[in-house]
Image (spheres, rainbow, N blue to C red):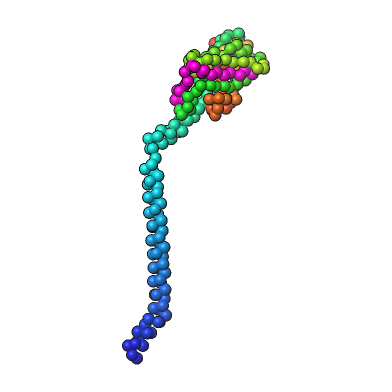
Amino acid sequence: MSLRSILFDLFHGQEFQEVKGDVKTILANTTQMMADVALMTVAVATLAQSVAALDLASLTTKVDALLMNSKSIWTMPTSFSAINDVVQVPVMVKGDPLEESIAFGFSVAFDPAELRFIAAHAGNATLSWQAVDGNETAPGQVVVGGFAGIGAPIPGVDISEYVTLEFEVLVDVDVQFALDVYVDDLTGVQPEPYYGAILKTGN
């Protein structure tokens, strides 16, 4: 057998063809991988440019504020000792750190057989406001609100006394009331509704 015949059989035999096919597959896969790497390189470069363009200090501040943003409302502990006592119920608010408060509103619900609404007074944080008031729209239903006008806004980062509710207690047991329907700068405050209590003390 001639050398030419041997070489022909070597390069055209089944085993060689299988190896040749495997090599082609490997080359094709390698080409695709190189293309993928090129695309990833472009994507990483684009991401790096986007990150470099961010105001990281501002972004950090906003994220911290969002994590802290749990606008909430509650009343300070209040008690009485006898029927017909008059009590002052301070309403406290923790606002949105990204916002100032210049107006608020909410409703108060209670049993008119247990409490008599007298008035709503400006709290420590709203003494300079143009108006803070409460209006009994129906027995056991009061709408409370206020607006700053030329008064000082309330910083959102503060825990502030917005208003003080004044009641006469008509029974000799613990009584409960609810705050709800938050509007203006109290929109989204939690919990909704909030349940407060005026506790009987003494004999």
| Residue 61 higher or lower than 33, as above or below | above
| Residue 177 locus on image (x, y percent) | 60, 20
| Nearer the observer, 90 or 170 | 90
| Residue 118 locus on image (x, y percent) | 60, 11
| Residue 39 locus on image (x, y percent) | 41, 56
Q: Residue furthest left?
A: 3
**Within the image, what quadrant is residue 120 found in?**
top right
Q: Quadrant of the N terminus?
A: bottom left
Q: Residue, x 34% and y 87% (percent of image)?
A: 4
On screen, residue 22 versus residue 137, left or right, reads left
Q: Residue, x 54% and y 15% (percent of image)?
A: 131
Q: Residue, x 49% and y 17% (percent of image)?
A: 150
Q: Is residue 14 visible?
A: yes
Q: Residue furthest bottom?
A: 1
On screen, residue 55 versus residue 115, left or right, reads left
| Nearer the observer, 157 or 57 | 57
| Nearer the observer, 188 or 108 | 188
Q: Is residue 174 visible?
A: no
Q: Residue, x 33% and y 90% (percent of image)?
A: 2
On screen, residue 128 versus residue 48, left or right, reads right
On screen, residue 141 versus residue 56, left or right, reads right
| Residue 4 higher or lower than 29, as above or below | below
Q: Does the stretch in magenta take in 119?
A: no
- In magenta, the rendered stretch is 141-160
| Nearer the observer, 178 or 34 | 34
Number of labels in the image equals: 0
| Residue 41 higher or lower than 197, as above or below | below
| Residue 201 higher or lower than 195, as above or below | above
Q: Quadrant of the C terminus?
A: top right
| Residue 85 locus on image (x, y percent) | 58, 9
